[in-house]
Amino acid sequence: MAKKTEKLTTRTLNRLARELPEGDEAWDADLAGYHVRAGKRGLVCRVSYYNAAGQRRVLTLGRYGAPLTAAVARKRSEDALSIVAQGGDPREVLEDAKAEAKRQQQQTLRAYLEGPYTAFQRRRKDGEGTLRRIRQDFADWLDKPMGSLTRADVESWQAQQETTKKSRSPKVSSPKLRAFSTLKRSYDALQALLAHAAERNVIPSHPLKGVKLQKPALTDEQLAEQGTERRYLEPEETEALFAGLEEYQDEKRQQRRSSRAHGKAYLLDLDHVAYVDHVVPWILAMYYTGLRPGDLFGLRWEHVNLTFATIRKTIEKTAHKRPEPQTFPLARAAADVLKTWHEQQGEPKTGLVFPSNRNGRRMAPTAMQRPWAVVRKLGGLPDDLQLYTLRHNFASQLVMTGADLLTVSQLMAHADIQTTIAHYAQLAPDHKRDAVEAFARRAPGQGAEKAAVEAAQDRLEVVKHPESPCGND
């Protein structure tokens, strides 16, 4: 069969890909040695040449198509033939390059960490701490080739770290779950090591470049607190809140009257119940107790003792640190709200205090956001006033009325009193002067000393104003 020769342009290669029989070849008319062969999966671009020993060899450039275009194939052919012209063997060059890349790819994390990277980090201020962090947190990866690390490895590592309790000391009996910020510091240290290795060509490229840890989903608490500020309600805002709650009830009752009058008489008459739905008692419960939304959503009648006016439950946010239930006293107003709601619900002994109207299960974390917006609008409250402000108001008002910070911390179910101090201590009345005055008044002879001081002040006034009636007397 005659040797097929023509200029291997893009148009030519596209045509040959359709027409050239499998096993046949077409050679470039301008570049000796450059040709294509038809295979089962398309055209394969190749270069034929003779090495220094006179042996015929073929270098496969790859299958035609993206990313190997006609222009790229021609350029690679020219490079290969240039090596041949200089007495080299392009196949050997390529094989050597592949072998070096493989060697680099197989460089383990341990080898680089204990070798070049240790020397680098020891010149840095906290280098030893960085090395120690990588050794401890990536112990399972130390014997892996750096170049083999993948996104899947990172995701698996993060998932394991977020569900495994760790302690820096074997003597610690109650290790804590690792925070996202802690994991990120460790991962950033690893990223820096890999970047260091890639910049020095120890590995062909950074295997985890662009791979980030996934931020954990927001908890109910964080969702509720987003966008809020720690502030309390001004007196007029408190009045507006209660007016809004009353208006909410009135509107619901009016809507129900209208529905019953227009063919829906089967609906419950809301004019004869204390609460039209769960919204008002839920908001009042948060106002009077300062409980977090999550704890109100999870509140059960088993937790409520209406006889002794208490709530006893495990706080959800701190359950991993303090699983035992905590007891909270209820103000008379709070107890009255829950008692009325309890009677309206048929005096259940068990079950959620505020179940979902749709399925009777626990409400979603954002279930109260829309009702709160309605109440806020009806009361004329600021649009940016968040529901969580009711919790901050509870703590703030307690502090401003003189409750000690330890009591407030316990009522707020803070895991650490420092949280209470950090956010509410500035609201406490200044009792320091009253305290030192009370102390001084208890000193011996304080009464006689006070009389002497007052007499001396009187005499001084006489000296300053001898013409005054007091002086003449």
Image: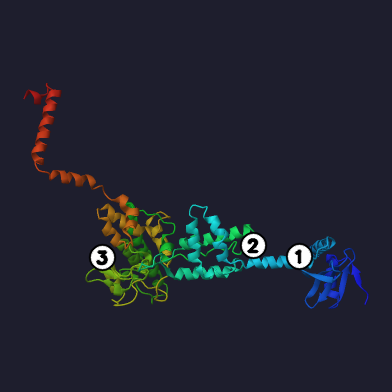
User: Does 385 sit left or right of 473 as displayed?
Assistant: right
Compared to 272, does 225 lie above or below? above
3D distance between C-alphas at marks 1 and 2: 20 Å
Picture disc at residue 333: none
Q: Residue at x 29, y 72 (%)?
A: 303
Question: Closer to the N terminus: mark 1 or mark 3?
Answer: 1
Residue labelled with disc 2: 205
User: Does 433 sit left or right of 22 as displayed?
Assistant: left
3D distance between C-alphas at marks 3 and 2: 63 Å
Q: Which image quarter is the C terminus in?
A: top left
User: Does 444 sit left or right of 175 as displayed?
Assistant: left
In front: mark 1 or mark 2? 1
- Which image quarter: residue 299? bottom left
Question: Closer to the N terminus: mark 3 or mark 2?
Answer: 2
Of 138 and 89, which appears nearest the observer? 89
Q: Position of residue 435 (x, y in %)?
A: 20, 47
Q: Residue at x 34, y 74 (%)?
A: 352
Residue labelled with disc 3: 330
3D distance between C-alphas at marks 1 and 3: 82 Å
Which three-letter amino acid code belongs to the residue tagged 3?
Leu
Q: Residue at x 61, y 69 (%)?
A: 148
Residue labelled with disc 1: 93
Which three-letter amino acid code belongs to the residue tagged 2?
Ser
Furthest residue toward top: 467
Of 413 and 53, which appears nearest the observer? 53
Q: Which image quarter is the N terminus in?
A: bottom right
Question: Closer to the N terminus: mark 1 or mark 2?
Answer: 1
